[in-house]
Image (cartoon, rainbow, N blue to C red):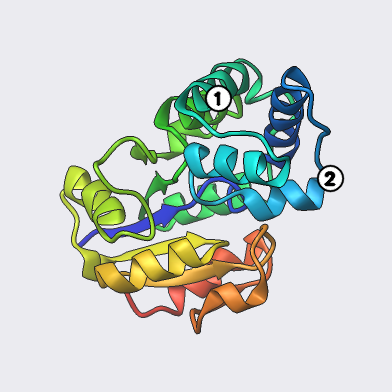
Amino acid sequence: MDRIALFDLDGTLLDSAPDIHSALDRLMAAHGRPGFSREEVRRMIGDGVPVLVQRACAARNLVNSPELVAEFLKDYEAHAADETRPFAGIPEALAALKAAGWRLAVCTNKPEKAARIILDNQKLSPLLEQVGGGDSFPVRKPHPGHPLGILARMGAEASRAVLIGDHHNDTRAAKAAGIAAVFAAWGYGTAEMAEGAPVASAPDELPDVLAGLGIG
């Protein structure tokens, strides 16, 4: 039976904070507000674009609106791959997992279009069977319907899957869906977000950590 590895994107496969940071700063500047530090931006990432913009607006006393979300997204999509790169060791880890028989997919709260732009740019798309974004289903992580929706597309079972991510949205979505979880400690989340899941300290540990899950 197939083994499925679902990966979060921002903070797990990709160091996307530089381009998200730049787009947020441009949005704030356009509305007369100061920008952010990189650490502020990292703490805002993980819950999708609407929540990202909401948090940014709240931090700068700017009234949030759907129009601001659309403004951010249009600008971000045009620059989503300017500085975003895979974390060191990610391409090699994905290739190793695929060679070991794992089927790979992305489960991200980032909009699907933006996710595909970056994955294509970084030549990771050929390794992946599916990309499920935050707007691909009626729900997004931590709702279990998000990873389960991707598995349904793949004709796969939750008992044969693992969700790898750097945020409590990933560990909680996995638990609720009956999917194994692995916490990506190199990402943007804090150690507490592992919430008891096995931890991979670096991408090159992923093949061994996943092999130890007993999915077999």
Left or right of residue 4, residue 153 in this image: left
> Residue flagged by tag 2: what amino acid is it?
Ser
> Residue flagged by tag 1: what amino acid is it?
Leu
Left or right of residue 132, residue 89 in this image: right
Q: Residue at x 60, y 49 (%)?
A: 45
| Label located before the other in sequence (2 or 1) | 2
The residue to which callout 2 is attached is: 37
Image coordinates of residue 123 in percent, x first then y, are 56, 28
Foreground residue among 215 and 59: 59
**Label of residue 68 in the image:** 1
**Mark 1 Cα-neighbour bin, 10 Å: few <14, some 14–19, many ≥20:** some
Image quadrant holding the C terminus, namely bottom left
Q: What element carries label 2?
A: loop
> Can you tell which quarter of the image residue 25 is in?
top right
Image quadrant holding the N terminus, namely bottom left
Q: Which residue is drawn at 73% across and 28% down?
A: 28
Foreground residue among 20 and 106: 20
Q: Which residue is drawn at 50% across and 84% down?
A: 196
